[in-house]
Structure formats: structure tokens, C-alpha cells
């Protein structure tokens, strides 16, 4: 029995030692020594004040924590990125320990991240930009986004997280924030009229709410964002222009790519004199109606490329055709739509610096003659290439599909799709010859009359009037005199003839009886 008792004690001691060693090894495994002379697995690249840590190729070892020790001497880490890591928790003093104070930008992409300790970023006294991308986080309190962090932070990226409510993120201390990226969140599915961005974000200038599930944005959700200049709403199932923009008086750039808007009008949209750019590409847009852009008198850039269902644009969409409002458009792209006709009176085309209209199904009839015949006089350019031939730009906000300019010849874009006799004929081959009689008549009809011609016409009119007056005045005066004196001799009557009634009878008798 005594031997058995000592054997059990020895076994417990061995197990305790084994667990202690295992724990120590686990802790050691979560400390990563990087950027040394010898390549580690995993490792980071440390160059020009930029440190990038990512999984080894072919599904090798990955970072399970941000507890990284930099071996490279004299290296200053200002821009630090953990790409597709397996970090599960961010703990105090375990994110670049001893190097926190120099970091200005920190990016952590980790699908497995679920836990953030309070005050974990307080040692990052120079931090201006923070990104926590693609995590399982569904709540962040002001104990994480502290006042100390808020004193330096100007950019925050929380894209592709699990936030279901706007109130799940406490922005109270982030009063210096200029840019906020919430792309891929789920706010829109649970939004209500009581949901507002807090007053703490009054200095915010750029907000990305792409693919966030918004079907309607008609409330005052943005009422506190008094300095917001750029709003991204790409990828939301919006069906109309969001009237919530009425509460953003400083708005300059609006992105509505890949939405479900079919008809564009100005219903419920108030005047915004600051809006300069609207990007609305790859949508379900069918029609742009009368005065659709009249609420934006200072609009300069309109990018509506790749709206393949777009068949109609009202000639008064900018208020130029009927209202006489001179648009300030400098660049317009209607490329790769389904337009047959572009209205001549839509814009003052010769004052537009960039005109992109290629890739539409143009019907080369007299309604389009103004464009075909003046192709060399307009600033026609290819602003965007077709999506099938484009490569995505590596920078910019998620959700906004920006693309490199794709150099292609004009011959592939500006050609007739009808009538049959002109099908696939490029504009340049018929320029100056399409409906020329119709065009000349219209030009003659609208040609202003010179001032000296007006004087000549006036004098000629006076002369003609004088001749006509002289021709009819004499007979009229005679008629007037006759009516005034009825006994005046009238050569056409027998009233004053000297006839003797008796002699007439005698003479008649004599004639009867010879």
C-alpha cells in the first residue's frame, strides 16, 4: 500500500511537470521573433518602417497572436499589418511589446478574433489609423475605444465584422475621427428611425456603409454628421435615391454603385449646393427622369457607366432644356448602357471637358445626327473600359469598384446599332453626312437674326404698308363721299336722267303703229 501511495504521488508529480512544460511551450509558441537574420516560420517583412506579417506560403505556420518581438536593430515600425492571421485575442502588452509608441497605422485581419481586452490600444500613443477587418467581433465598448486612443485616432476600419446594431460600437471618445469604414456590416437589416450616428462623429468626413443591407435610407440617421463629405452606399439593396442625404449639407461625393435603383428622379430630394460627384455604376437603372439632378446645381462629375438596362434619359434631367439652368458638369460617363439616343439638349456639350458615351446601342437616325456629325468637335473620351477587360485597383475603399483606365480604340465603342443599313458603322465614317438636310433646316430655323437685318425688315414693312394704304385710300374716300351726299351724280344710275314720260309714251305708240 505504501509503495502504491508513493507511486501515485510520483505519477501526479510527473503529470504536473508535463502540464507546466506544455503551458510554457504554448506561451513560448505565442511569442514570435521576427525580422532577424534567420528566417522564421512564420515571419514578417520589415522594410522602410513597414512591417507585414502573414501566413507562410502553402498553408504553413500562421500568427496566433500579435505578441511579436522585432530582432532587426534600429528598425522603427510605423506601419504594421497582420494579414489573414489566426489571432484569437488582443491582450494588453502583447501587441508589439516595447514598440507600440512608434506605430501610426495598425491593421489586423483575423477571422478568429473574438476578444479585445480593455485599454489594449492605450500604449499606441501615435496611432492614427486602426483596422480590425473580418473578425467575429460584435461589440466594442468605450473601454476599448478609450479617450486616450481617441486623442490620436483619425481613421477606423471595421469592415466585414459581425456588428448588427449601430449601437454595438461605442464612438463616444473618437471625436477626432475623419474616416470610418463599416463596409460589410449588418446595420441595414436592423436599422430604425431612432438609429443615429452619434454627435461624437461630428468631425467625420468619409463614411463607408457599402453592403450593409440598407433597403431604405429615409431617416435622419446622418443628422449629426455635419462635416461629412463622402458617403459610400455601394452594394446596398436601395430602390430609390436615399432622402437621408438631405441631412448631410456638406456632402460632396455620393457613391451608389451596384444598388437596385431603377428610376432616378428628385422626389423628396432637397437642394444640395455642395454635391459635386455622383457615382452610380452597375445598377438596375432603367430611366433618368425630368429634373433628376435639378437639386444638385453644382454637380461636376457623373459616372453612370455599365448600367446595361439604362434606356432613357429625359432631355431636362439637368434642368437645362426647359428651365434654362446651365449645368456645371465637367465629366460625364454613360458608357456601356443600353441607350439608343442621347438628347442634344441634355447638356451644353461643348463645355463638357470629358464625355464618355461609348458602348451603347446607338440608333443612327436624325435624332442622333447632332452627335454623329459633330464627333470631332466634342471632347469624347473613354473614361471607363468594359468590366470584362478591367483590373481592380489595389487601393481605395471596398465596395467602390474603381478600375484602371483600359486603352482601347474608339472604333469599338462609337458605332451604329441601327438602322440595318448603318449597323456596325463607326460614327467617323458618316460624320457630317447624317440627315444633313434635316440638320440644315433646324440650324436655319434656330439661327439668330442679325440686328441690321431687323432694321431692313422694318423699313421694308413700312414701305409696303404705305403702298397698300395709297392703293386703297382713294376708292375708300370716294365711297365715303358718296355715302355722305346721296344726290351726287352717279353715272351708273338713271336717277337724274332727263326723260319725258309723255313723249316716251307717244314715241312708243308711234313705233308700234307706223
Image (cartoon, rainbow, N blue to C red):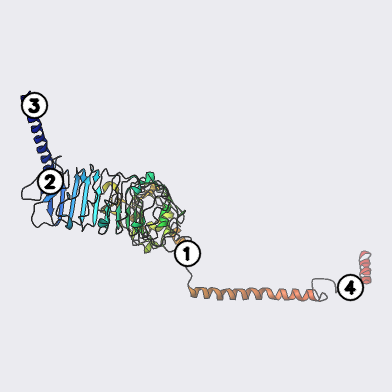
Residue lying at the far top of the rendered structure: 1
Residue lying at the far front of the rendered structure: 2
Residue at image coords 17%, 57%: 101
Q: Callout 4: helix, strand or loop?
A: loop
Left or right for 7, reference 319: left
Distance, label 2 to label 3, CA atoms, is 40 Å
Do the residues bearing badges 2 and 1 touch, measured as CB atoms within 8 Å?
no
Q: Which mark is residue 499?
A: 4
Name which of mark 1 and mark 3 comes first in the sequence.
3
Query: Marks 2 and 4: which is nearer the front?
Result: 2
Q: Which mark is residue 5?
A: 3
The residue closer to the viewer here, 381 or 331, is: 331
The residue closer to the viewer here, 92 or 324, is: 92
Q: Callout 2: helix, strand or loop?
A: loop
The answer to whether one can see residue 77 in this image is yes
Q: Which quadrant is home to the C terminus?
A: bottom right
Left or right for 274, reference 162: right
Left or right for 344, reference 102: right
Query: Marks 2 and 1: which is nearer the front?
Result: 2
Q: Residues within 10 Å of mark 4 (few under 14, many from 20)?
A: few
- Looking at the picture, how far across and down is residue 320, in whole percent? 45, 61
- Looking at the picture, how far across and down is residue 140, in whole percent? 29, 48
Q: Callout 3: helix, strand or loop?
A: helix
- Looking at the picture, how far across and down is residue 198, in whole percent? 36, 54
Query: Marks 1 and 3: which is nearer the front?
Result: 3
Q: Which mark is residue 469?
A: none
Q: Residue under circle 2? A: 31
Residue at image coords 23%, 41%: 112
Distance, label 2 to label 4, CA atoms, is 151 Å
Distance, label 2 to label 1, CA atoms, is 81 Å
Amino acid at each position: 500500500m505504501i509503495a502504491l501511495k508513493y507511486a501515485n504521488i510520483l505519477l501526479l508529480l510527473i503529470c504536473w511537470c508535463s502540464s507546466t512544460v506544455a503551458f510554457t511551450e504554448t506561451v513560448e509558441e505565442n511569442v514570435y521573433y521576427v525580422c532577424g537574420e534567420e528566417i522564421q516560420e512564420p515571419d514578417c517583412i520589415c522594410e522602410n518602417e513597414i512591417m507585414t506579417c502573414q501566413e507562410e506560403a502553402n498553408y504553413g505556420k500562421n500568427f496566433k497572436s500579435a505578441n511579436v518581438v522585432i530582432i532587426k536593430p534600429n528598425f522603427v515600425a510605423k506601419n504594421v499589418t497582420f494579414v489573414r492571421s489566426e489571432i484569437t485575442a488582443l491582450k494588453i502588452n502583447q501587441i508589439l511589446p516595447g514598440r507600440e509608441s512608434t506605430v501610426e497605422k495598425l491593421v489586423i485581419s483575423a477571422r478568429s478574433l473574438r476578444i479585445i481586452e480593455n485599454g489594449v490600444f492605450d500604449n499606441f500613443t501615435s496611432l492614427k489609423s486602426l483596422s480590425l477587418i473580418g473578425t467575429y467581433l460584435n461589440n466594442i465598448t468605450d473601454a476599448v475605444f478609450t479617450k486616450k486612443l481617441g486623442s490620436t485616432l483619425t481613421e477606423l476600419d471595421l469592415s466585414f465584422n459581425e456588428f448588427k446594431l449601430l449601437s454595438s460600437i461605442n464612438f463616444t471618445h473618437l471625436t477626432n475621427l475623419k474616416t470610418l469604414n463599416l463596409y460589410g456590416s449588418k446595420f441595414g437589416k436592423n436599422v430604425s428611425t431612432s438609429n443615429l450616428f452619434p454627435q461624437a462623429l461630428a468631425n467625420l468626413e468619409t463614411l463607408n456603409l457599402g453592403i450593409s443591407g440598407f433597403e431604405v435610407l429615409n431617416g435622419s440617421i446622418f443628422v449629426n454628421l455635419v462635416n461629412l463629405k463622402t458617403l459610400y452606399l455601394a452594394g446596398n439593396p436601395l430602390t430609390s435615391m436615399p432622402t437621408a442625404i438631405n441631412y448631410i449639407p456638406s456632402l460632396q461625393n455620393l457613391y451608389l454603385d451596384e444598388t437596385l435603383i431603377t428610376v432616378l428622379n428628385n422626389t423628396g430630394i432637397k437642394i444640395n449646393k455642395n454635391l459635386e460627384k455622383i457615382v452610380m455604376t452597375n445598377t438596375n437603372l432603367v430611366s433618368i427622369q425630368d429634373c433628376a439632378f435639378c437639386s444638385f446645381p453644382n454637380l461636376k462629375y457623373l459616372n453612370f457607366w455599365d448600367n446595361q438596362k439604362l434606356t432613357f434619359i429625359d432631355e431636362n434631367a439637368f434642368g437645362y432644356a426647359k428651365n434654362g439652368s446651365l449645368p456645371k458638369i465637367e465629366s460625364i460617363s454613360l458608357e456601356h448602357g443600353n441607350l439608343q439616343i442621347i438628347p442634344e439638349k441634355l447638356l451644353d456639350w461643348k463645355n463638357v471637358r470629358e464625355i464618355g458615351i461609348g458602348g451603347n446601342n446607338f440608333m443612327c437616325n436624325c435624332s442622333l445626327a447632332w452627335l454623329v456629325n459633330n464627333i470631332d468637335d466634342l471632347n469624347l473620351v473613354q473614361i471607363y473600359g468594359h468590366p470584362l477587360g478591367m483590373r481592380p485597383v489595389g487601393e481605395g475603399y471596398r465596395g467602390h469598384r474603381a478600375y484602371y483606365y483600359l486603352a482601347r480604340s474608339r472604333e469599338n465603342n462609337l458605332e451604329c446599332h441601327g438602322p440595318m443599313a448603318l449597323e456596325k458603322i463607326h460614327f467617323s465614317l458618316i460624320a457630317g453626312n447624317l440627315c444633313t438636310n434635316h440638320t440644315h433646316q433646324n440650324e436655319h430655323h434656330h439661327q439668330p437674326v442679325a440686328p441690321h437685318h431687323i432694321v431692313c425688315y422694318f423699313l421694308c414693312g413700312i414701305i409696303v404698308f404705305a403702298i397698300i394704304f395709297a392703293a386703297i385710300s382713294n376708292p375708300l374716300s370716294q365711297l365715303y363721299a358718296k355715302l355722305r351726299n346721296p344726290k351726287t351724280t352717279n353715272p351708273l344710275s338713271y336717277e337724274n336722267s332727263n326723260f319725258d314720260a309723255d313723249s316716251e309714251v307717244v314715241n312708243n305708240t308711234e313705233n308700234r303703229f307706223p
